[in-house]
Amino acid sequence: MATLLDALNAAVNHHMAGHAQAAANAYRHILTAEPAQPDALHLSGVLRAQTGDAAAAVRWIGRAVRVRPTAAAPWGHLGAALRAAEMPERAEPVLRRALALDPADGDALEALGASLHALARYPEARRWLDRAARLRPGHAATLLNLGTVLRDQRRFDEAEACFDAVLAHNPAAGDAHLARAVGRLVRGDLRAGWEGFEHRWHRFASPPWAGQPPGGATILLHMDQGYGDAIQFVRYAPLVARIAAQGGGRVVLETHLLLYRLFNHSLGRCLGSSIQVLVRGEDPPPHDIHCPLMSLPRAFGTELGTIPGGVPYLAPDPGDVERWRGRLAGVDGDGAGLRVGLVWAGNPQHRNDRNRSIPAAALAPLLSVPGVRLVSLQTGDAAADLNRLPGVAIPNAMERVRDFADTAAILANLDLLVTVDTAVAHLAGAMGVPCWLMLPHVPDWRWMLDRADSPWYPSLRLFRQPRPGDWTTTLGTAAAVLKAQAARAARMVTG
């Protein structure tokens, strides 16, 4: 027993000293000798959580609580790992169990508040985070989570006070800068928001470009966020090219393979050699200065009234449009009625996917609108969900899609796109294609608050949840508007 205790103490010392591999090896040796040793199981899981492997943490700590179910700390750490693994539904009962065993567990209080926040249960989340903040005043992670909930409840002054408190102790706290920036952007305070957003990325070895005349330099524009962000902010690339050309400079646009054909056709060719579009590689191409696409609004000092409004700024290849016209006619008959594309789910790995994606069964109001030819543009596992519903058979146009250039060609053949907040909404907006965007009660910052239009994309119409989780009202409203629009289109054809 003394030998095992000594081994455990040595493992804990390695762990506390930050020697992760040595601690992992020591825990492994202990568990080889005694597979059900609860402290080694628990701390192995904690170590994995600290190194970013939340799924492994859940497995190890789950074993620990089965061996010793009356210990509070493992329950709290298991709940936190479940939350980190984007499983807040499972985290909630685990964290409530932890707090029943130890009501003063600050980590469990914070994790429960964060889990309820992820489930869009904002008043409950705030109550638990308030308790955590009273228990440990000034705790940075608690203040950050509390401020984020307050921001999503539109209590912006209180939220900023939380973020400011974090930054007062640690001015370099990037998460707090970003959280504060989101609150400012969603209210339309773009200039302040862009400044805060600069804390999201690690700088290159080359100096950043911030709008100054570049002389004869080569400016590298590059993706640092997702596809939708790249589509939204690539509108600035021609503006950069004009500035660069004045001093004999040039622009290189580095992008993902799935965006290459679209960007090269729309930007590289139409501007000749002023923009060279490249597929992103392991190392950046030769350049003198650089700017992430999402930093371009800051470089140009963009405010609501100065958003570059030249839409469309992306366009598919005409040959692709013709090919997809024939393919779509083959799947929906090219008959009468509005051709409407439908996307109901985003990337399941997105941290807010449970709130922004729509269950297929909730689409029933849209599916029953007469005079509409629906075409699915859904990708991923969710693509099969719609046709599992009784009596529903909607063709999916995405089976032969290679990249966003193909998706753009499909959009060019639609009368309307109805979608959740995902990259295809940005593509429709960049092309000027009519698009109805279904938004959760707490939207992404770029859609701001309460308005039904977007200053970024004139062809978008925004349909918002009136309360968290209420897709019934949102989709019912959209279906009623679609029914009226389809009826008008039918009268125009027959009249």
Image (cartoon, rainbow, N blue to C red):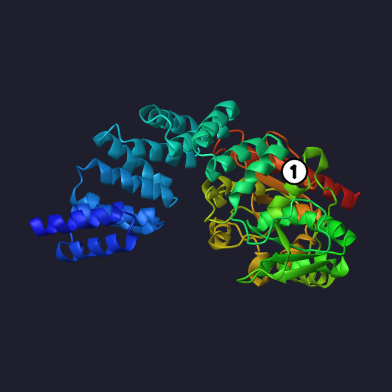
Is residue 172 positioned above or below 17 on the image?
above
- Image quadrant where residue 445 sits: top right
- Image quadrant where residue 272 sits: bottom right
Q: Position of residue 185 (x, y in %)?
A: 67, 39
Count the labels in the image: 1
* Residue that protrudes farthest toward the left in the picture: 1
Look at the image and tell me whether residue 269 can be seen. yes
Give whichever of 19, 196 is nearer the camera.
Answer: 19
Compared across the picture, whether 371 is left or right of 362 comes to right
Q: Secondary structure at mark 1?
A: strand
Residue at 83% from the left image edge and 73% from the top image edge:
319
Residue at 57% from the left image edge and 38% from the top image edge:
470
Q: Position of residue 375 (x, y in %)?
A: 69, 60
As shown in the figure, which amino acid type bears the numbered disc 1?
Arg
Compared across the picture, whether 457 is left or right of 271 comes to left
Look at the image and tell me whether residue 153 can be seen. no
Query: Alpha-carbon neighbours of circle 1 within 10 Å: few (<14), some, or many (≥20)?
Result: some
The residue that mark 1 highlights is: 461
Give whichever of 102, 177 is nearer the camera.
Answer: 177
Residue at 82% from the left image edge and 38% from the top image edge:
305
- Image quadrant where residue 220 sits: bottom right
Q: Quadrant of the N terminus?
A: bottom left
Give whichever of 461, 232 is nearer the camera.
Answer: 232
